[in-house]
């Protein structure tokens, strides 16, 4: 991150955000591995819908039904 900062970049946008997105994608990939698998991904962090960078996370996920209604998820 220091290298990014030294060259005038934004460590959050250029280092931390991409790393966090990759980590989330890897976790989702472990949930569903083949066509017979089923799972529910629950993300209880409202920054995904309240912060501009949340759209980056959501866009990185595979297509799936989404809801903010816990009753629909279970």
Image (tube, helix red, strand yellow):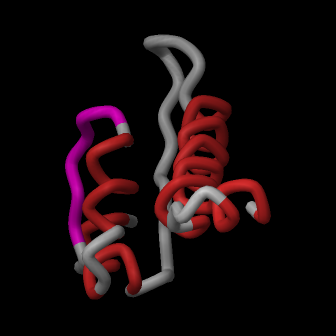
Residue at the spot 37% in from the left edge and 41% down from the top edge: 61
- Mostly what secondary structure, the magenta segment? loop
Q: Nearer the viewer, residue 1 or 64?
A: 1
Q: Quadrant of residue 22?
A: top right
User: Residue 21, image x and y in percent?
Assistant: 53, 50
Farthest residue in the top direction?
35
User: Residue 50, image x and y in percent?
Assistant: 27, 87
- Residue 20's place in the image compared with 51, above or below, is above
Residue 57 is covered by the magenta coloring? no
Q: In the picture, which quadrant includes the N terminus? A: bottom right
Farthest residue in the front direction?
7
Residue at the spot 39% in from the left edge and 86% down from the top edge: 46
Left-right relation of 35 to 20: left
Residue 63 is covered by the magenta coloring? yes
Farthest residue in the right direction?
2
User: Residue 43, image x and y in percent?
Assistant: 49, 70
Left-right relation of 22 to 50: right
Q: Nearer the viewer, residue 28 or 73?
A: 28
User: Residue 32, image x and y in percent?
Assistant: 54, 28
Q: Nearer the viewer, residue 62 or 52?
A: 52
Start-end of magenta stretch: 62-67
Left-right relation of 41 to 57: right
């Amino acid at each position: 991150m220091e290298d990014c900062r030294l060259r005038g970049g934004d460590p959050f946008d250029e280092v931390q955000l991409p790393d966090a997105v990759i980590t989330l994608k890897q976790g989702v990939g472990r949930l569903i591995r083949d066509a017979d698998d089923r799972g529910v991904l629950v993300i209880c962090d409202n920054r995904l819908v309240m912060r501009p960078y949340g759209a980056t996370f959501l866009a990185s996920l595979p297509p799936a039904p989404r809801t903010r209604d816990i009753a629909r998820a279970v």
